[in-house]
Image: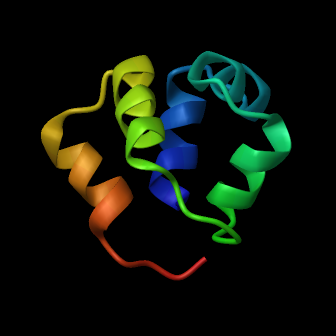
Amino acid sequence: MRMLKSVMSFKGETQRSLANKIGISESSLSNKLTGISDFKQTEMQKISTVLSLSPQQYYDIFFNIETY
């Protein structure tokens, strides 16, 4: 989720602000960003909208396997 964290930083979103905008707790978002739990499809879509992700960014963030 390094790429997601980078995009969040570039767009000026903190974990708290993004969590609020997608309707989950900050701790839940933290768990998802560290790989403890997975994003739901609806959360991925909301993040894409909030961060104005391109289709390629969406794929790279949520479907490319990376180590944490």
- Residue sticking out furthest to the left: 55
Q: Nearer the viewer, residue 10 or 51?
A: 51
Q: Nearer the viewer, residue 8 or 38?
A: 38
Q: Nearer the viewer, residue 14 or 10?
A: 14
The number of numbered badges drawn on the structure is 0
Q: Is residue 17 above or below residue 44?
A: above
Residue at the spot 60% in from the left edge and 33% down from the top edge? 9
Residue at the spot 76% in from the left edge and 51% down from the top edge? 30
What x and y, as percent, mark residue 10?
51, 29
Residue at the spot 32% in from the left edge and 21% down from the top edge? 52
- Residue sticking out furthest to the right: 27
What x and y, as percent, mark residue 1?
53, 60
What x and y, as percent, mark residue 36?
71, 71
Quadrant of image for the C terminus: bottom right
Q: Is residue 34 above or below residue 13?
A: below
Q: Is residue 31 above or below residue 44?
A: below
